[in-house]
Amino acid sequence: MKLTQIRNATNRLDYAGKVFLIDPWLAPKHQMSFVDIPDMPFHIPDPMKEHLPMPFYNLPMDMGQILSGVDYYIVTHLHPDHIDMTPDGTVGAPLDKAVPVICQSEEDASVLRSSGFSEVIVLPTSGMEFGAARLTRVPALHGTVVPCGDAMGIVFEASEENTFYLAGDTVWYSGVAETLRIY
């Protein structure tokens, strides 16, 4: 297993012979702010922060290096700090739409499909095999401010690897404790 943090929630995970690009937010520094998001379904408690340009930092490496050899994208939830969003409501503009994308719900899958992704997989809570790796969707509580929306965590398991728990955007709560107890 090799985990490389790219920026914010964007990580590249080499696991059981597969490469997963998690929450692929690849926008250049200061490309947008929360107020630029069409039909924003949530607001930040501090209205001044909605105007801060995001992302705060440039990518630490060339985008080609980040995207090279990726077998699957994972989008834990559709927020602008987890995947690139455009004013027309589509997501994932810099990504190869032929690479399969794993997501949490049919609602997210619909947005990903309408954004041009040809293979969208809703990860079940019962788990699913991806080569030698088994990925299982586990609960996450995306903050206490309502509405922050749904999010997911993922447990990665493989016979030749340590178990890896991607908690996702979550606060500490009983669902996280239960996931740690089980896995």
Image (cartoon, rainbow, N blue to C red):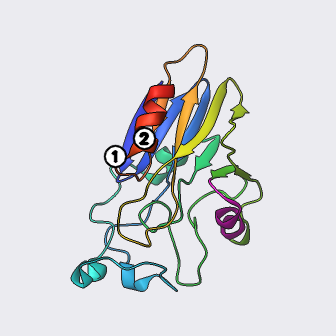
**x, y (%) of residue 131?**
71, 28
Q: In the image, is residue 7 part of the stretch drawn in magenta?
A: no
Total numbered labels = 2
Q: Judging from the image, what secondary structure is the residue with disc 1 in?
A: loop
Q: Judging from the image, what secondary structure is the residue with disc 2 in?
A: helix
**The disc labelled 1 sits on which kind of residue?**
Trp
Q: Is residue 128 left or right of residue 85?
A: right
**The disc labelled 2 sits on which kind of residue?**
Val
Q: Toward which corner of the image does residue 15 lie, by quadrant? A: top right
Taking depth in this image into account, of 71 and 174 the one nearest to the observer is 174
Q: Which residues are magenta?
A: 104-112
Q: Residue furthest right?
A: 118
**x, y (%) of residue 95?**
59, 59
**x, y (%) of residue 4?**
40, 37
**x, y (%) of residue 143?**
36, 60
Per the image, the residue denoted by label 2 is 176
Identify which residue is drawn at 41% across, 43% down.
174
Per the image, the residue denoted by label 1 is 172
* Mark 2 vs mark 1, CA separation in Å: 6 Å
Q: Are marks 2 and 1 in contact (CB under 8 Å)?
A: yes
Q: Is residue 69 visible?
A: no
Q: Toward which corner of the image does residue 127 lie, by quadrant? A: top right
Q: Is residue 24 visible?
A: yes
Identify which residue is drawn at 65% across, 40% down.
71
